[in-house]
Image (cartoon, rainbow, N blue to C red):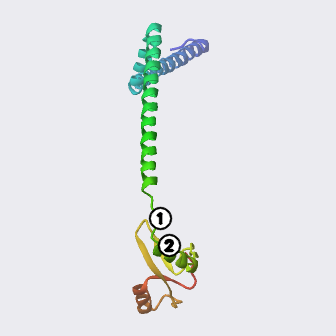
């Protein structure tokens, strides 16, 4: 029992403080566990990166200089080899060209006349537009004619089946593909 209201008030404040202390101690424990789990997961997921970074940092300055000099020497050797290979390739191409030029002969007289006569009659008009009466798709290997259907309400299934036998059906109200 409490003797005065002050004693009761003091006891209540003391209990509230205890509750806040308990709450903050639990939050502190939670934060510690969270930091440990976060650091552990970071180390596990980035272990290889961290190891490579550590190894790079541990290379001595002398080793870095030696490594750079070695790479320079190797690059020079590779450049010399590539240049020699290119020169050989160019020489081979020149020899092949000279051989082809020496073997080149004039076509027969009859063939020359034939080409001259037919070249004048040949028409170089090419149709580069795709056909408008076919559906062509290389991806699904489709090359089918496009059939205009006279069916308007969609109830005459017999007519529709006959149209499907002739190709891909396009209804009059639908847009062009």
Identify the residue shown where x is 47% and y is 19%. 72
Q: CA distance from mark 2 to mark 1?
A: 9 Å
Identify the residue shown where x is 48% and y is 21%. 31
**Residue 75 can be seen, yes or no:** yes
Q: Which residue is mark 2?
A: 112
Identify the residue shown where x is 46% and y is 27%. 79
For label 1, count other residues whose C-alpha is less than 10 Å away and answer few (under 14), some (14-19) or many (20+): few
Residue 83 at x, y percent in the picture: 46, 31
Q: Are marks 2 and 1 in contact (CB under 8 Å)?
A: yes
Q: Residue furthest right?
A: 6
Residue 25 at x, y percent in the picture: 48, 17
Identify the residue shown where x is 41% and y is 22%. 43
- In depth, the one of 30 and 119 nearer the eye is 119
Height in image: 71 above or below 174? Answer: above
Q: Which residue is mark 1?
A: 106
Residue 52 at x, y percent in the picture: 41, 20
Q: Secondary structure at mark 1?
A: loop
């Amino acid at each position: 029992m409490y003797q005065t209201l002050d004693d009761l008030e003091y006891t209540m404040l003391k209990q509230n403080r205890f509750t806040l202390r308990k709450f903050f101690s639990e939050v502190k424990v939670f934060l510690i566990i969270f930091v440990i789990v976060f650091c552990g997961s970071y180390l596990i997921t980035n272990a290889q990166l961290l190891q490579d970074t550590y190894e790079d940092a541990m290379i001595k300055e002398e080793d870095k200089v030696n490594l750079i000099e070695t790479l320079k020497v190797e690059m020079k050797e590779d450049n010399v080899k590539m240049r020699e290979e290119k020169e050989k390739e160019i020489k081979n191409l020149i020899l092949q060209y000279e051989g082809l030029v020496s073997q080149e002969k004039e076509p027969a007289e009859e063939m020359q006349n034939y080409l001259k006569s037919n070249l004048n009659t040949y028409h170089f008009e090419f149709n580069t537009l795709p056909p408008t009466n076919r559906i062509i798709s290389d991806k699904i290997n489709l090359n089918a004619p496009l059939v205009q259907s006279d069916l308007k309400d969609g109830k005459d299934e017999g007519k529709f089946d006959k149209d499907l036998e002739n190709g891909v059906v396009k209804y009059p109200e639908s847009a062009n593909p």
